[in-house]
Image (cartoon, rainbow, N blue to C red):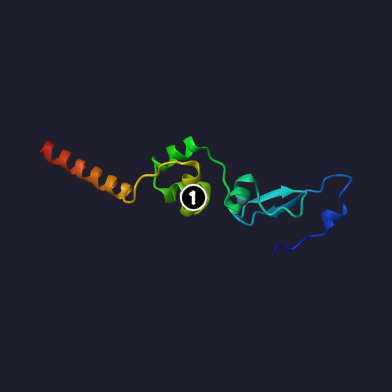
Amino acid sequence: MVERIEAPHLRKGSDLMLRQQTCIRCNKTYESDDPDRVFCGRACVTAESRSFEVTADELYRLVWSMPTTHVAAEFGVSDVAIAKRCKRLDVKKPPRGYWSRLRAETKRRRQERRKGAT
Ligand SMILES: [Zn+2]
């Protein structure tokens, strides 16, 4: 629970009383006249509620450009949330082990190139 500070509330009506508040999610300080507000912005609100906005195209591009855990970090949600959203938007995700295989493949190719150079 966030403790209320009553003072700004009492002055409601005339001029807006901005108050320094700290985001409960990212600890960023922000100014707001709303004592009930607990997040610095929309990004933290959506992240915390685990409902983030992303289009199918954008999601597809993201999951095929980096591992799901990284995509999840981008949105500040869990990778399960990403997986669920992929399912809902009918976005095909890379198969399990795709990224480790890709890493191994890149490494192998680099080694072969080095071998070929000598
Ligand atoms: Zn925040």
Specify the quadrant that holds the N terminus.
Answer: bottom right
The residue under label 1 is: 84
In the image, residue 78 sits, relative to residue 55, either above or below, namely below
Measured as percent of width and height from the top left, residue 106 is found at 25, 43
Q: Nearer the viewer, residue 17 or 61?
A: 61
Residue at image x 68%, y 54%? Answer: 38
Residue at image x 41%, y 42%? Answer: 92
- With 23 as the anchor, is 118 left or right in this view? left
Measured as percent of width and height from the top left, residue 21 is found at 70, 54
Measured as percent of width and height from the top left, residue 17 is found at 81, 48
From this viewpoint, which residue is outermost toward the left? Answer: 118
Crowding at mark 1 (Cα within 10 Å: few <14, some 14-19, many 20+): few
Residue at image x 30%, y 50%? Answer: 100
- With 43 as the anchor, is 64 left or right in this view? left
Q: Nearer the viewer, residue 116 or 94?
A: 94
- With 98 as the anchor, is 91 left or right in this view? right
